[in-house]
Amino acid sequence: MSQTPILAARDINSRAELHSNLEIPVKTGNAILDANLYDLSRRFCGDKDPDTVLQLLATVMNAAQSGLESHDLEIMNSTLDELFAAEKMFMPYANTRKVTCFGSARIRPDDPIYKLASDFAKLCADNGFMVITGGGPGIMQACNEGATGERSFGLNITLPFEQAPNPAIAGSDHLMNFHYFFTRKLNLIKQSDALVALPGGFGTMDEIYESITLIQTGKATIFPIILLDTPEETFWKRWYNFVFKELLEAGLISKEDMFLLYPCKSAEAAYQHIARFYSRFHSYYFQGDQVVIRMNRPLTGDSMEWLQHDFQDIIAAPDLQQMENDGNDPQPVLAPLPRISFSFARRNFARLRQMIDAINDGD
């Protein structure tokens, strides 16, 4: 698959949430300290937004003066440190699409699932994607081996048992050891353009359920979620049937939510599902109530009519339009891409996923 030179910023909160509701204090109540923080934020933040830097500095100082226990401050510091270290590691590869692979640390190399994981990761790497794993043994090692250490990352979690960096990624500058599960999981999802889950235990279940929830609620950018088994295995079929019966039939989720999941039985099918998702669709962002969907190539007039008709339930006003570019694009380098925009009724992000599929299938 050919890679677009520049990709949109991945944001776990999506551009649907611009943090306008957050009230992070900019002042500490100490006039001398406030003046110094203001000066620091203007002099040493480079080309970054100085107000955001000021908010960071003020939040830290307010925390220090708030009476929090030292342990609480240590958690805050470690969290910020891990997030920063991860961003530094991924920064040189920001414009390369990536696939995160979940799966058990206990799968042995002689298990057919191990070979399937390795074959899938190799197929992704051969087509220009990088692969992200949890950095440990089992499925994670299989994927790092298949993609090679040069084309993959390992986000390892430090545990007293079971989890140590696998040989395929150990010692690499693509490896990071996390202390906290939540910062590790944030990066497994945030840095990714697709998720592929192979059989696994509680950790895999936690990762797949949270990924679905984040997309379902608009807190993460929409991307493919693939459930991958060997032809002989029924692991995900049984899980999928449980979700269908116990959640969907009970009315606990919407029928459209099932379209966020794609069960399949081969490495080729999994990869082709990802390639199809990015065949015309590029990325999207929000401008107020408008969603703007960037595309690699424009749609025909007939396709626009079909979209307006078939997705009128999520188009809040009859204002679907196609544009050649957008001078207000938050990433100006992507402004020349063709795009469509409309007022999005944000109650059903799974329907937006279906709309992306329809865009990819358009003439």
Image (spheres, grey):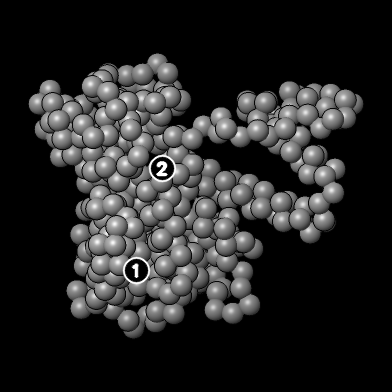
Judge whether residue 329 can be spotted in this image. Answer: yes
Q: Amino acid at mark 2?
A: Gly
Q: Are marks 1 and 2 in contact (CB under 8 Å)?
A: no
Choose mark 1 or mark 2, whichever is in front: 2
Residue pictured at 12% horizontal, 23% vertical: 301
Judge whether residue 118 can be spotted in this image. Answer: no
Horizontal and vertical percent position of residue 15:
45, 34
Mark 1 and mark 2: Cα distance apart in space:
24 Å
- Count the labels in the image: 2
Horizontal and vertical percent position of residue 326:
36, 18
Disc 2 is placed on an element classified as: loop
Image quarter for residue 103? bottom left
Image quarter for residue 34? top right
Q: Amino acid at mark 1?
A: Leu
Q: Is residue 260 above or below residue 39?
A: below
Image quarter for residue 57? top right
Residue nearest the viewer, comparing 124 with 158: 158
Crowdedness near tag 1: few (<14), some (14–19) or many (≥20) residues, C-alpha within 10 Å: many
Q: Is residue 228 above or below residue 35?
A: below
Residue pictured at 85% horizontal, 43% vertical: 65
113 horizontally vs 28: left or right? left
Horizontal and vertical percent position of residue 317:
27, 23
Quadrant, the C terminus:
top left
Crowdedness near tag 2: few (<14), some (14–19) or many (≥20) residues, C-alpha within 10 Å: many
78 horizontally vs 146: left or right? right
Residue nearest the viewer, comparing 118 with 20: 20
Residue pictured at 90% horizontal, 26% vertical: 32
Disc 1 is placed on an element classified as: loop
User: Label 2: which residue?
Assistant: 218
Residue pictured at 61% horizontal, 73% vertical: 159
User: Label 1: which residue?
Assistant: 198
